Structure formats: structure tokens, C-alpha cells
Amino acid sequence: MTFQVPDKTSINTDEFKPEANVIPFAPELIGFILEDLKITTYRFGKKYDYLQVGDTVDIQDSSSKQIVGRAKMVFDFRLVD
């Protein structure tokens, strides 16, 4: 499934550190998430390593800091040696 993201997207000037069990998204993606068009996200690095399959997280608008929904972690993929 694909959808058209606006040409101009949000730019964060500093790193936003959300509370535990909160995953922030750019404001232009919130509508797609709420309409079930964006159902997958990838986070690289160790910032969210504490999350496990089955955990429930809050979805946050990174601009307004408003919690707009909840999501459940359903799949975890990690490379092995």
C-alpha cells in the first residue's frame, strides 16, 4: 500500500526524547496512521530496544506532543550472526 506524503515534511531542529512507551511521528503522517494507511514503522538504533512484541505504545504527534492513538507491537525482526 502506498500513499502520497507532502513534498515539504517536518524538520526537527533538535532531538525529541519522548516518554517511555511513546512513539512520536511527524504531523504529516498522523492522518495516514489514523486512517490505517501507515501501519508499519522502523526505528533504528537502540532508542526503542526496550519495546517487545505485545507491548502497547502511545502514538504522538511530534509537533504538538498530543497523543493521538495507541498501537501494539506485533512483529520484531533482528538479524543474527
Image: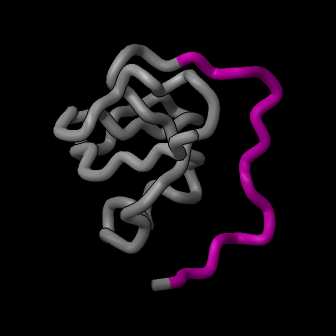
Q: Quadrant of the C terminus?
A: top right
- Find residue 34 and report its horizontal and vertical position in percent: 32, 61
Residue at x-position 73% and y-position 48%: 10
- Up the image or down, 26 lies above or below 32; here it is above
In the rendered image, residue 75, in percent from the top left (x then y), is placed at: 30, 51
Q: Is residue 57 left or right of residue 45?
A: left
Q: Position of residue 44 (x, y in %)?
A: 62, 38
Q: Is residue 43 above or below residue 5?
A: above
State the residue at coordinates (28%, 32%). Answer: 52
Which image quarter holds the N terminus? bottom left
- Which residue is nearer to you in this view: 75 or 29? 75
Q: Front-most of 40 and 11?
A: 40
42 within the magenta span: no
- In the image, which residues are magenta? 2-17
Q: State the residue in front, 48 or 2.
A: 48
Task: Determine if the magenta segment contains residue 3.
Answer: yes
Q: Image point 57% across, 17% down: which residue?
A: 17
- Secondary structure mostly seen in magenta is loop
Q: Is residue 31 visible?
A: yes
Based on the displayed image, in which of its 4 quarters is residue 62 positioned? top right
